[in-house]
Image (cartoon, rainbow, N blue to C red):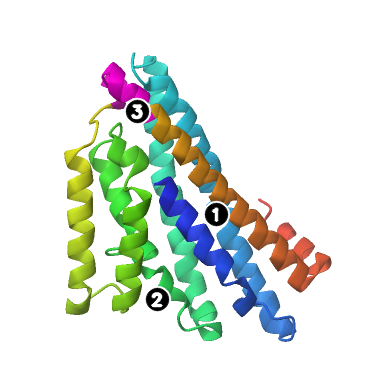
């Protein structure tokens, strides 16, 4: 799932110049508010993702402790809800952001579409198997990039016959990944446990890239709309 977060943050960051140009002051302020909401929601997912990785490392090999297993399962459930919150926040922002760039949601659809997007598919996977490597890591980076490109090329809104190729490719990729998965990381054989520690390191790198993109987007948004506007946004976002 960490490659998904990195890819989502990368796409969002790549759009900031199109959303904020410094000339449409009123619209820029509204767009900035939506972007900050998305960034805050995504940062929340990243923080929890870091905790999941730490817990997963403790579970490898000897299974960790019952308390560790319980915390991992509970944190995963929270993460599923938080990922859904990111998608919902993007849905709420869609009407405004697509008026600025009509291609925005089409670019994001392979990731965030409610019916067939990769984040939706990850959520379904998490409900099936809390401790499997498919839930923890989901798809390899190359597969995520390939599926996103297929989705972009097809276009559409995630429904109808035109999405059949993307849906089939996603299903095949998940099926292939699950055929090689460790079903329960707590019971991974010694050799696989070492392999999974390498995957944990790669996941941390993906997570770090997502955090970096979020920070860059926040800083660029602040530079575009000014410190005072961002201060007002922070006050509104504060619980």
Q: Is residue 23 above or below residue 14?
A: below
Tag 3–tag 1 contact (CB < 8 Å): no
Q: Say which element carries label 1.
A: helix
Rounded to the nearest angstrom, the CA distance separating label 3 from label 1 is: 31 Å
Disc 3 is placed on an element classified as helix
User: From mark 2 to mark 3, how far is it between C-alphas?
Assistant: 36 Å
How far across and how far down the image is residue 4, in percent?
41, 53
Q: Is residue 119 visible?
A: no
Q: Which residue is mark 3?
A: 195
111 or 75, nearer to the observer = 111
Give above or below for 231 relative to 195: below
Queried whether the magenta region covers residue 86, the answer comes back as no
**Looking at this view, is 226 or 197 the one in front?**
197
Q: Which of the labelled discs sits on residue 106, or is there none?
A: 2
- The mark closer to the camera, 2 or 3, is 3
Q: Secondary structure at mark 2?
A: helix
Q: Position of residue 3 (x, y in %)?
A: 43, 50
Q: Earlier in the sequence, mark 3 or mark 1?
A: 1
Residue range in magenta is 185-196
Q: How dense is the environment of label 1, judged by Cα within 10 Å: few (below 14), some, or many (20 and up)?
A: many
Does residue 73 sit above or below 216 in this rendering? above
Residue 178 in the figure: left or right of residue 53: left
Asked whether disc 1 touches disc 2, contact meaning CB atoms under 8 Å apart, the reply is no
Residue carrying label 1: 41
State which tag comes first along the sequence, 1 or 2: 1
Residue sitting nearer the eye, 5 or 194: 194
| Residue drawn at 41 percent across, 55 percent down | 84
């Amino acid at each position: 799932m960490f490659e998904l977060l990195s890819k989502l943050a990368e796409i969002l960051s790549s759009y900031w110049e199109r959303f904020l140009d410094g000339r449409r002051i009123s619209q820029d302020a509204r767009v900035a508010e939506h972007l900050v909401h998305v960034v805050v929601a995504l940062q929340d997912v990243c923080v929890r993702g870091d905790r999941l990785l730490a817990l997963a490392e403790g579970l490898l090999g000897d299974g960790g402790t019952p308390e560790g297993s319980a915390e991992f399962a509970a944190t995963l459930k929270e993460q599923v809800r938080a990922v859904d919150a990111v998608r919902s926040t993007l849905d709420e922002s869609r009407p405004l952001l697509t008026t600025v760039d009509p291609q925005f949601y089409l670019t994001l659809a392979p990731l965030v579409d409610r019916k067939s997007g990769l984040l939706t598919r990850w959520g379904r996977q998490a409900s099936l198997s809390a401790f499997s490597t498919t839930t923890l890591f989901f798809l390899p980076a190359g597969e995520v990039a390939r599926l996103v490109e297929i989705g972009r090329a097809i276009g559409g809104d995630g429904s109808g016959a035109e999405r059949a190729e993307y849906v089939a490719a996603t299903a095949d990729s998940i099926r292939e990944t699950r055929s090689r998965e460790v079903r329960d990381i707590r019971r991974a054989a010694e050799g696989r446990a070492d392999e999974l520690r390498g995957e944990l390191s790669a996941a941390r790198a993906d997570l770090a890239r997502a955090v970096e993109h979020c920070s860059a987007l926040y800083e660029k948004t602040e530079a575009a709309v000014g410190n005072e506007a961002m201060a007002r946004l922070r006050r509104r976002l504060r619980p």
